[in-house]
Amino acid sequence: MKLPHLEVKEQALALARGIQVQDAFSTVRANALQKLENTSFPHRRVEAWKYTNVVELQKGHLLQTADGNAAVDVPTAIFPHRLVFINGVFNAAASSTLPEGITLTRLEGQSELPHQELEEELPAPFALLNSATLQDGVHISVAPGAQPAPIEALFISTASAPAHCNTRLHVSLANNSKLTLLERYEGAGPVLTNAVTNIVGADNSALVHYRLQTENAESAHIGSVLVLPGAESDFKSYQLMHGSALRRNDVRTIINHSNALVNMKGVFIGTGNTHTDNQLTMEHRVPNSRSNMIYKGMAADTSTLVFNGSIHIHPGAYQTVADLTNNNLLLNRGATVNTKPELIIYNDDVECSHGTTCGELDHEAIFFLRTRGLNEAQAEKILSLAFINEVLLEMPDENVADWARPWLNAVLAKQEDAE
């Protein structure tokens, strides 16, 4: 039997080489394929993939493309304006009109890829595979000074047997513009969603970015988010995710302009035998910028959580203020949390901190709630929700928070029922 990473690489290369279409993306695909051929696929001896095994993909996800015309039940919208994608293919019929101030460009190989220079910054190998097979996606562009109504990009995956789909989303904010964007992933069945999201902000732009991942436990999701804030810009990120058979998120923020403010908060929950891996990198390349990352994890049953957060202060990036916190709850002795915060600093005049905690719920608090008539599972559920409520309370949009609370209740209810 081949090693999992070697078999997956063979399948990925065969998939990319099978794309014979000649269009505006041909050069992008060819360059990505060349890099992919010279890239090692992840295994346990690769530090960044030490705790995440791609053996799940040996089931044949890359051998079959999920049907972009599959019949699906489209969930209720969180925001009135939204774009809908089915197995990575844009579905105009299920989508709505977008508000004034936004231009939507369909990426069908008819136009140049926006911000093509970002291809050099994407993490290997799965983002490279996305580029090597690129055929569909959208570019959302916000006009200078525009403050459009919030929009939702809904990605639905579905299949009855192992398959894959690629999603590609580009977002550009012009000078002095503001946008609230909800990126939402729903799905059923053993589908690998290989997602790439690129966000570029111009001077004095502001973005509130929500990313919700709620595919079922059979699914696999490998996502890359690349963020480049502009000067004097304000970027806020909120990620909520539930574990699946394989879930991996690479989020990389590159600060190339001074006086950028970046705040990133996230909640990731593992139940059953699911796996969730978050890799966050904050690169400060210029002086006078601020960043703050707070991620909270909860591991139940026999689930596994992985968190690797890195703050990288480049030479000359003086007067940088950067903080990183990862707090985790173990709800079951059979669950596992692997966490590693990192500071890489090449400058003296900075203020940086990093820290992580991993522990159990307070037994005295559980006892107190039980004396008030609750059983142990109910008490644990209330305390678990309190642990992550900080992130929900800071969300600027009540619509998203109102959606998240019942979703979190349902996730924790499954844990309660399993006990």
Image: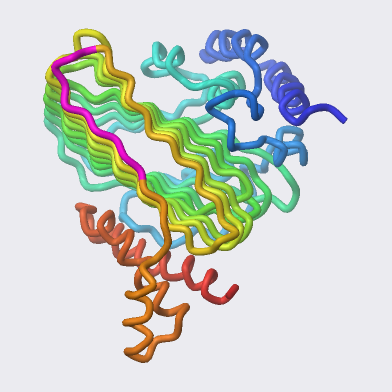
Q: How many marks?
A: 0
Q: Residue furthest right?
A: 1
- In the rendered image, residue 351 lying in the magenta stretch gets the answer yes
- Direction from residue 343 to residue 195 in the image, left or right: right
Residue 81 pos. (x, y %): 32, 50
Residue 41 pos. (x, y %): 65, 22
- Direction from residue 47 to residue 42 in the image, left or right: right
**Residue 158 vertical position relative to residue 90 in the rendered view, above or below:** below
* Depth check, front residue: 139 or 4: 4
Coloration mode: rainbow
Q: What residue do we see at 48% from left, 48% from top? A: 185
Quadrant of residue 405 within the rendered picture: bottom left
* Depth check, front residue: 98 or 73: 73
* Depth check, front residue: 294 or 239: 294
- Direction from residue 77 to residue 416 in the image, left or right: right
Residue 84 pos. (x, y %): 46, 46
**Residue 271 vertical position relative to residue 63 in the rendered view, above or below:** below
The N terminus lies in which quarter of the figure?
top right
Q: What residue do we see at 32% from left, 61% from top? A: 387
Q: What residue do we see at 53% from left, 63% from top? A: 332
Quadrant of residue 335 within the rendered picture: bottom right
Is the stretch drawn in magenta largely helix, strand or loop? strand
**Residue 373 vertical position relative to residue 142 in the rendered view, above or below:** below
Say whether residue 164 is visible: yes
Residue 45 pos. (x, y %): 64, 24
Quadrant of residue 397 within the rendered picture: bottom left
- In the rendered image, residue 412 lying in the magenta stretch gets the answer no
Q: Which residues are magenta?
A: 347-356
**Residue 277 vertical position relative to residue 135 in the rendered view, above or below:** below
* Depth check, front residue: 231 or 140: 231
